Image: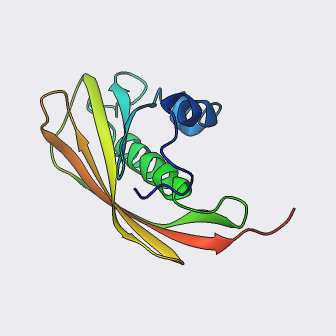
Amino acid sequence: MIWHDGIPTLEAVNEMSRNTLGAHLNMIFTDIGADYITASMPVNHTTHQPMGLLHGGASAALAETVGSVAGWLCINKEKQNCVGLELNCNHIKGKRDGTVYATARPLHIGGSTQVWDIRILDEQDKLICVSRLTIAVIRKIAP
């Protein structure tokens, strides 16, 4: 298992996400396993671009949210923080409505960096977007 403090509950992860961008886009964490985490996001007027398709920025926000939460769950929260360094998204297929699901799995979990593979699929398991998120693990600085 990759999680620093054991597998968290979905309730705890969703509670942590209150009053964030993810909450405003109606992202909900739906599954956590020993080495992955998944969240859903509706495809509707709140996540559309002007042509009525899923906005690439909404997909990027979903990918970064899932990957960042995954990274945070892997660190010692008393001593470390993690911050995004780079997000790459390839938008494979358009989507007009329904729900998309992003799953983050680690490619590398190191002491100073992490790299996450995030796949966004639709309800029929069709690939909508593939992303890679690189995270810096930094020493926590007292306030």
Farthest-out residue, right: 143
What colour scheme governs how the chains and residues are painted in the rendered image of this protein? rainbow
Identify the residue shown where x is 64% and y is 73%: 138
Identify the residue shown where x is 43% and y is 25%: 46
Q: Quadrant of residue 100?
A: top left
Q: Position of residue 14 (x, y in %)?
A: 54, 31
Identify the residue shown where x is 73% and y is 61%: 78
Quadrant, the N terminus: bottom left
Q: Quadrant of residue 120?
A: top left
How many numbered tags mark residues here? 0
- Residue 57 lies left or right of residue 72; in this view the side is left
User: Closest to the observer: 91 or 117?
Assistant: 117
Q: Is residue 81 above or below residue 7?
A: below
- Residue 21 lies left or right of residue 59; in this view the side is right
Q: Is residue 141 above or below residue 65?
A: below
Q: Position of residue 54 (x, y in %)?
A: 29, 34
Q: Quadrant of residue 31?
A: top left
Q: Is residue 141 above or below residue 40?
A: below
User: Closest to the observer: 43 or 29?
Assistant: 29
User: Closest to the observer: 107 or 65?
Assistant: 107
Q: Position of residue 77 (x, y in %)?
A: 67, 58
Quadrant, the C terminus: bottom right
Q: Is residue 31 above or below residue 120?
A: above
